Amino acid sequence: MKILLIGPPGVGKGTQSELICSFYKLNHISTGNILRKHIDEQTELGKFISSFKIHEGNFVPDDLINNLIKDMKHDGLLENSYLLDGYPRTIDQSVFYVNNIISNLNECIAIYLDADRDYIINRIMKRRICNKCGRIYNLSQYNHKFSDNVCSKCGGKLIQRLDDNIDVFKNRLEIYDKTTKDVVRYFKELKVLFEVNALGEIKDVFNRIKNVIGEYYDSY
Ligand code: AMP
């Protein structure tokens, strides 16, 4: 099972990825987390990535991210079931993925999570992330007591992402509108795209996703 999770920033991709991966035993690959890790560890690549100011919402170049994914494939990390969260994000990346990463289009399913903008803005302003393991929390959700600001999974500190402020967020939405919508269209034309309404409780959204995955994988 190979799942591509697509959707605007703040729609809940990270949270749903975690649920999907633990339910279906998939490897969770978040390109955002990979890029942030390189920056935090100040690797050579991390310094290069920093120059694109991803905390302001700018994308890294397609070649860079495509090469990271290609390297993962060469290292055998894409052989088993996985969920890709945050990739592909542009048409170039989508074509690269279909032509170079998978061998059969039927082995992948693209799930498009969408919700209205006010809902998304509200969510993103309340989002916190663990600075150690990357787990996502939302101040409005029940899954954590926030008084201590500590990750209940690994004990890391809960922080607000640099790109989670209103101005940066608007910039990210704008970039998303310009680029990722083409990705949705592309996978729709290939007939492997399923749209899921991301409004509402986490568990309800997750149930909708499970229905889509169940239907798709039962059908062949
Ligand atoms: P995310 O955690 O998925 O929201 O990603 C955080 C940031 O990393 C994005 O706003 C982009 O700047 C960058 N990024 C992540 N994935 C990609 C990608 N596939 N292509 C280009 N930039 C990316």
Image (spheres, rainbow, N blue to C red):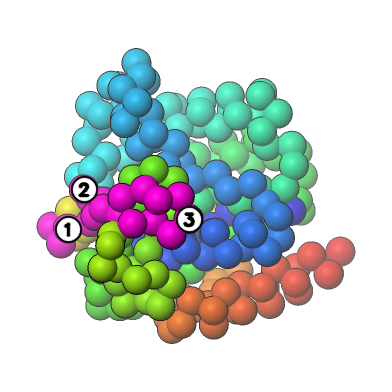
Mark 3 and mark 1 in contact (Cβ < 8 Å)?
no
Mark 1 falls on what kind of element? loop
Query: Residue beneath label 2, please?
Result: 162
Examine the rendered structure and indicate whether residue 9 appears above or below residue 198.
Answer: above
Instruction: Give amino acid for label 2.
Output: Leu
- Residue 72 position within the rendered picture, expressed as x and y whole percent measured from the top left: 60, 29
Is residue 153 covered in magenta?
yes
Residue at figure coordinates x 43%, y 59% from the top left? 152
Relative side of 117 to 45, left or right: left
Identify which amino acid the numbered label 3 is placed on. Lys
Instruction: Give the residue pinned by disc 1.
Output: 165
| Element class at badge 2 | loop
Disc 1 crowd rating (10 Å Cα; few below 14, some 14-19, many 20+) is: some
Q: Mark 1 against mark 3, which lies toward the viewer?
A: 3
The secondary structure making up most of the magenta span is loop
Tag 2 near tag 1, CB within 8 Å: yes
The residue furthest right is 220
Q: Nearer the viewer, residue 155 or 92?
A: 155
Q: CA distance from mark 2 to mark 1?
A: 7 Å
* Image-based side of 43 in relation to 92, left or right: left
Camera-nearest residue between 112 and 79: 79
State whether residue 40 is above or below residue 2: above
Q: Amino acid at mark 1?
A: Asn
- Residue 29 in sight here: yes
Q: Is 86 inside the magenta-drawn segment?
A: no
Where's residue 150, x and y in %? 33, 57
**Quadrant of residue 211 in the image?**
bottom right
Residue at 74%, 37% in the rendered image: 79
Mark carried by residue 153: 3
What's the magenta region?
150-167
Height in image: 177 above or below 216? Answer: above
Secondary-structure class at tag 3: loop
